[in-house]
Amino acid sequence: MILAIDVGGTKLAAGLVTPDGHVLETRVAATPQDADAERLWKALEELIAPMPEAEGVGVGCGGPMIWPDGRVSPLNIPGWRDFPLRERLAASFPGRTVRVHNDAVCLAAAEHWLGAGRGHANMLGMVVSTGVGGGLVLGGRLVNGGTGNAGHIGHVVVEPGGPLCGCGGRGCLEAVARGPALVAWAQEQGWSPGHGPLDGGPYEEGRAVTGRGLASDALRGDPVARAAMARAGRALGLAIASATHLCDLDVVTVGGGLSQAGAPLFGPLEEALRAHARMDFARRLRVVPAALGQSAGLVGAAALILAGDRYWDAI
């Protein structure tokens, strides 16, 4: 079995994955906020310490990173800049294969291996959550690019001169469509979770001012929440149209917390996509929700080892 680790700006997850991609055991912890590099590492160590022995370790982590060395600088985890994540894990698991790749790349690998992209040779797998990322599969194999960062669709510009992005640019897809940015935009428009015209009552226990909460309110019909989802959907559709013209894609899978918004997100996405994907070959593209849910990151991290002939070609 493989120990799979998923490192995100909001949560850390670890699980054991069988050779057929089944997740047997999962542990989750919140990603420490405003923590330095060693505190973050300690949190990860504490998460994986109780896990049983495994034959290898696959990791998905927010990007960018130096690949395949596994030195990570995730935009949404400021405490890790040029952090030697693979080296640290290799020291903790001597004699075992340790592979680290971008978390969105892992999601794409998972969806192509066992999810909504299965059977398609050319796909883009996207995650729309705390950040916006992607992984690209062409000819049935993961495309890494010169530095392992191919498929980073979150930094395609969809709104020139638009909001500032964590990368330092303006108008990137991530700056417009990531969960925290949408929540901030909706609050500026007067959104308050659970206090809209639908019920007027307190927000339900366990729900919070998050992208998932915004998506939930959009499904319930809150007009500001729906406007926020439409804003994200249009930006996604524009970026996907550009990607399919460049790469001649068969399918795009969209996962992450915001993808749970359903029609309020995917409706505007499709409208924008069809308005801009005008070439005949681009019109065949299908955009579908990711199929593997919360386990996708772990399945994809394990796929770096279990299906390395397709998803890992580093020398």
Image (cartoon, grey):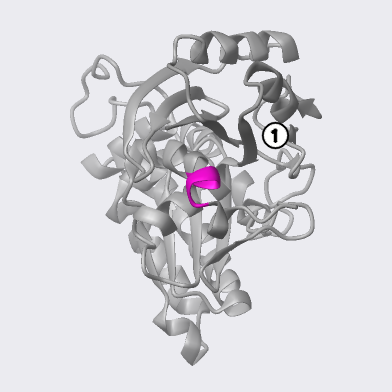
Q: Is residue 199 above or below residue 30?
A: below
Q: Amino acid at mark 1?
A: Leu
Left or right: 205 with respect to 268? Answer: left
Residue 97 falls inside the magenta stretch: no
Residue at the spot of label 1: 75
Q: Main secondary structure of the magenta part?
A: helix
Q: Secondary structure at mark 1?
A: loop
Dividing the picture into quadrants, the one containing residue 32 is top right
Q: Residue furthest front?
A: 95
| Residue 26 x/y as whole percent | 37, 23
Left or right: 2 with respect to 59? Answer: left
| Residue 133 x/y as whole percent | 58, 48
Q: Residue furthest bottom?
A: 280
Q: Is residue 35 above or below residue 10?
A: above
Q: Which residues are magenta?
A: 303-307
Q: Is residue 177 visible?
A: no
Q: Nearer the viewer, residue 299 or 183?
A: 299
